[in-house]
Image (tube, rainbow, N blue to C red):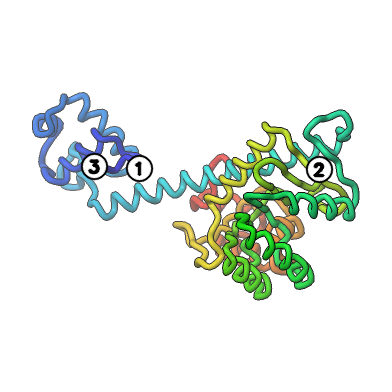
Amino acid sequence: MLTALGLDAVAESIYRGMLMHPQAGVVELASLLGTDEQAVRDALDILSELALVRPSATDAGRLRAVSPDIGMEILMARQQAELAAQQQRLEASRAAAAQLISEYTELRPAAGHPGVEQLVGLDQIRDRLASLTREVREEVMTFAPDGPQTADNMAASRPLNQQLLERGVRMRTIYLDSVRTNRPTVEHATWLAGLGGQVRTVPSLPTRLILTDRKTALIPVSSDDSAAGAVVLTGQGTLAALCALFETVWAGAQPLGDTVPVDAHGLTGQQATVVRLLAEGHTDEAIAKRLGVSHRTARRIASELMERLGARSRFEAGVRAVQRGWLGKDC
């Protein structure tokens, strides 16, 4: 029953047995639970590692089980830390994959490479995007990493979005968490949802991406200037990877109408991302770009987190964050 929290069936039965029979030793537990003494000792090693059993303060040499409320809190905190570390690894992998695709398409021209169409300049990008939109039949999936949208851009996109949704096209868009404080963007997202569109947010995104019908992907060549050029990708392997990337990010994203959750350390996803970027030595300007916020906002968030950590430098903030468990030790 507790396998989801990292406890196997044998260790769980030993833990339950110690709670019900606190005076029982290895031999008694083996007899009560119908197992051998070595299995009990192996389970005790696991329980000790998980801090679910501790040396008795009143009976030297005997182990006692911690109370279930404390034990479950320990297990859940451990699982949350593992999930946070896995999320960091996934985000790093997503960013590396997006960067690799951008670098490859920038270095290798589209001519002679099936499945890659090069677009130069904003006009070509808009024209190709318009044709892709006309051709879409089932689904559009989008990464929108630019933060709050301008009123003009949202107004211009409404007729096309409405047309797609009325045609029964499924639309899923992932914005940055920073849009949650921008009323026009929230109103636009609410309007989309009213027509059947779905909107979620995450702290950061690796690149701008538009996927249509899981057959075509449009991504910028340079993340620093998405209007300079883009590529249209149709290769099956590349599309399978990009669709899997979108689904992974979507699964971890938060619906726009929901309250942003905090982790076991009281950090939002945005704050946890800033902690990691600070530890990696990123500037306020780089952090602002990743979060889709102003330079001033990025500096304020960083300052508040450094104050919480009691750190006077970014290096010290990284060290203290690891010490407090805010970051994995391998970060």
Q: Secondary structure at mark 1?
A: helix
Which residue sits at x=70%, y=67%?
Answer: 148
Give percent across and percent down for residue 68: 24, 51
Location of the N terminus (image quadrant): top left
Residue picked out by circle 3: 55
Vertical side of 185 occupied by 225: above or below: above
Q: Please tell me which residue lies in front, 74 or 228.
A: 228
Q: Are marks 1 and 2 in contact (CB under 8 Å)?
A: no
Q: Earlier in the sequence, mark 2 or mark 3?
A: 3
Label 1 and label 3: CA atoms lie apart by: 26 Å
Left or right position of 64 against 248: left
Residue behind mark 2: 231
Q: Which residue is mark 1?
A: 4
Q: Which mark is residue 305?
A: none
Q: Earlier in the sequence, mark 1 or mark 3?
A: 1
Q: Residues within 10 Å of mark 1 (few under 14, many from 20)?
A: few
